Image: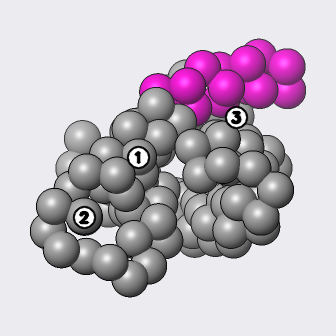
């Protein structure tokens, strides 16, 4: 399993995933202007997810033998786990952990950034073995 994280494919996944994470993070700030934080985290995740699928299909898992529809379905299923991780971490940090630590500046941004980064490894393995195998 360690070799999976030391591959060129994983590095490209990190770059493309980082781009999708940036889309996720910045769109959450925009969405937060018209909806609450918890909903904005979910909608932003979906925005980042579409970005991630396109980039992963084009640049990371080019060798995939699965059809587009099956890849998209499996991608969504893997992301159900990741979005649950992102939401739980973002909300827990924003409403409980960071305030308890006395953090008062950029609480939502810090919480969301940590929430977005957390599922990188689980998502890579899920996409490698299910979405784009």
**Residue 17 % position (x, y):** 59, 60
Q: How is the image coloured?
A: one colour
**Residue 14 % position (x, y):** 50, 65
To which residue does mark 3 refer?
A: 64
**Which numbered disc covers residue 91?**
1
Q: In this view, does 118 lie above or below 128?
A: below
Residue 67 lies in magenta, yes or no? Answer: yes
How far is the residue under mark 1 from the one under mark 3?
35 Å
Find the residue positioned furthest to the bottom: 105
The residue carrying pointer 2 sits among few (fewer than 14), some (14 to 19) or many (20 or more) residues within 10 Å by Cα, namely some
Between disc 3 and disc 2, whose residue precedes? 3
How far is the residue under mark 3 from the one under mark 2?
41 Å
The residue under the point 59% across, 52% down is: 37
**Which numbered disc covers residue 57?**
none
**Which one is nearer the viewer's eye here, 34 or 17?**
34
Q: Which of marks 1 and 3 is in front?
A: 1
Q: Is mark 1 on a helix, strand or loop?
A: helix
Q: What element carries label 3?
A: loop
Quadrant, the C terminus: top right
Q: Give the range drawn in magenta.
A: 66-82
Q: Is mark 2 on a helix, strand or loop?
A: helix
Q: In this view, does 41 lie above or below 73?
A: below
The residue carrying pointer 1 sits among few (fewer than 14), some (14 to 19) or many (20 or more) residues within 10 Å by Cα, namely some
Q: Can residue 59 be seen in this view?
A: no
Between disc 1 and disc 3, whose residue precedes? 3
The residue carrying pointer 3 sits among few (fewer than 14), some (14 to 19) or many (20 or more) residues within 10 Å by Cα, namely some
**Which one is nearer the viewer's eye here, 61 or 87?**
87
Q: Which of marks 3 and 2 is in front?
A: 2
Q: In this view, does 49 lie above or below 83?
A: below
The residue under the point 57% across, 43% down is: 38
**Which numbered disc covers residue 98?**
2
**Residue 18 % position (x, y):** 57, 68
């Amino acid at each position: 399993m360690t070799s999976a994280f030391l591959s060129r494919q994983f590095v490209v996944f990190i770059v493309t995933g980082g781009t999708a994470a940036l889309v996720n993070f910045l769109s959450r700030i925009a969405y937060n202007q018209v909806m609450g934080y918890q909903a904005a985290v979910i909608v932003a995740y979906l925005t980042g997810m579409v970005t991630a699928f396109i980039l992963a299909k084009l640049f990371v898992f080019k060798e995939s033998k699965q059809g587009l529809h099956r890849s998209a379905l499996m991608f969504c299923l893997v992301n159900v786990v990741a979005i649950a991780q992102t939401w739980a971490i973002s909300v827990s940090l924003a409403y409980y952990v960071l305030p308890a630590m006395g953090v008062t500046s950029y609480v939502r941004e810090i919480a969301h950034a940590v929430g977005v980064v957390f599922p990188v490894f689980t998502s890579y393995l899920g996409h490698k073995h299910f979405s784009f195998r």
